Each structure stands twice: as structure tokens, then as C-alpha cells.
Amino acid sequence: MNRLYHFPLSPFCRKVRLILAEKRIEVELVDEKYWEPTNEFLRRNPAGKVPVLRIDGILLCDSTAICEYIEETVPEPQLMPRDPVARAEVRRLVAWFDDKFYNEVTRNLVHERVHKKLMRSGYPDGRAVKLGAKNIKFHLRYMDWLLDQRRWLAGDKMTMADFTAAAHLSCLDYISDVDWSLSEPVKDWYATIKSRPAFRSILADQLFGFPQPPHYANLDF
């Protein structure tokens, strides 16, 4: 049985879950308190980070490495273009959300509001929360600009870039930190992805101590 060691409100884990589900690869989810790593978990990934995927008799770490392995071994449905220029654009946007968006938005909001409480590492830093709330407006405008030129974020077809962005936004939406009124195109794009079967397990997530907001699992939000 394929097994994914994950944390439900990690955008990197959610990205992998979405790619696996889109490829129709069944996987057992194992919740991992990565901030309290056991020796067993550190043997799986000495970096002490999630996600970690056991598949095909091997262990894979790092969300991008995992997703590209899945894409190469299960090529349909195709989530990376064949054209080298188009592939480079997808990879650029994956890096944009996993690096720039994460550090400027996700980390400032999800880490401060949720992870600190779970880790018992103090109260949210109000300055970081305000900075994350400010930064997300810039990123939504950028996504709006991309979608004004393209059907999907990286081009005319849905790719790994869309699932990466959706993974981050879904974490923020879980804690009601996305003002969807700022961009109708981004809201419509997210609604389309949110309606896909691959998103069902994400919408079913329930994090103890952090109940879902009413709109979170609503496809007509």
C-alpha cells in the first residue's frame, strides 16, 4: 500500500495529495507531527520534514521531487507540458508558490495562526500576520494578471503549477485568510479546481482545534 506521511495543513503535503489524487493513485495518509520527529520518522527523512511518500518500494522526500517522480512514472493525465519552454514556466510557478508565496504569505499566516498553537511555541506574531495579510493581495493581483492572459496559471492547460497554487490557497482558505472578493478570476479559477474529484479529501480535512469555516467545503462559495 502506498503511504504518505503528511501534515493536513501543509501546502507541500497538499500539493502531493492533489497530484496523487489527480493521477488516481491510492494512498494511505499517515498524520505526522513533524515538529516532534521520532527516530523512525527521521530514518525516513533525516531532514525531519513532510511530505514523505512510500511508493514502488522506495521512500521519496520533498514535494517537488515527489510530484515530478509521479509525473514521470504515471504520465496520464499529463500535468507537465512536453514543450521545454512551457515546462520551464510550470517549474517557475511551482517555485514561486513553494518559495516566494510560502515565505511571504503562507508561513506568516498558517504558521502563526495554527502551527504555533499546535507546537505550543507561543502566541501569533501580530506583525507577521499583518505582513502576510498585506502580501497576499500582491500575489492575488499577480495571479489575476496571469489568468487574464491564460486559461490556467501556466498556459492553456491545467498543470502542476495550478495544483501547487491551489494547495497553498486551500490552507489559507481553511483559516479564512483569503479575501476572494479581491479577484473574481482567481476565485473562478479556484472554484474550478476545488470542484475536481482530486480535491475531495482536501475539503474533508478536519484539524483538531481548528474547525472548518462554513464556506471551506462549499463548492459554490
Image (tube, helix red, strand yellow):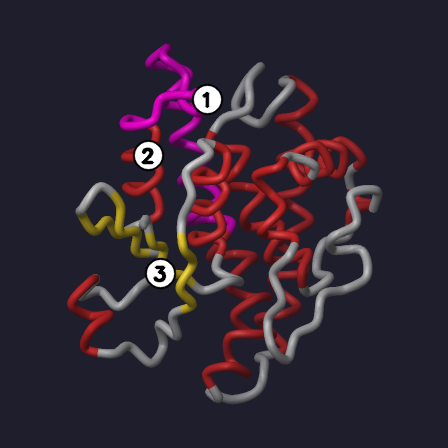
In the picture shown, does residue 169 fall above or below 85? below
The main secondary structure of the magenta stretch is: helix
User: Residue at point 53% right, 62% down?
Assistant: 9
Task: Tell me the tag on residue 5.
Answer: 3
Q: Secondary structure at mark 1?
A: loop
In the picture shown, does residue 18 fall above or below 50? above
Which residue is the extreme one toward the front? Answer: 1
Task: Tell me the tag on residue 70.
Answer: 2
Residue 68, position as x, y percentages in the image: 31, 34
Q: Tell me the kind of residue under disc 1.
A: Pro
Residue 33, position as x, y percentages in the image: 39, 75
Q: What span is colored magenta in the figure? A: 72-101
Residue 23 vs residue 150, the one in the foreground: 23
User: Residue at point 49% right, 26% down?
Assistant: 159
Mark 3 neighbour class, 10 Å CA radius: few under 14, some 14 to 19, many 20 or more:
many
Q: Earlier in the sequence, mark 2 or mark 3?
A: 3
Residue 178 vs residue 20, the one in the foreground: 20
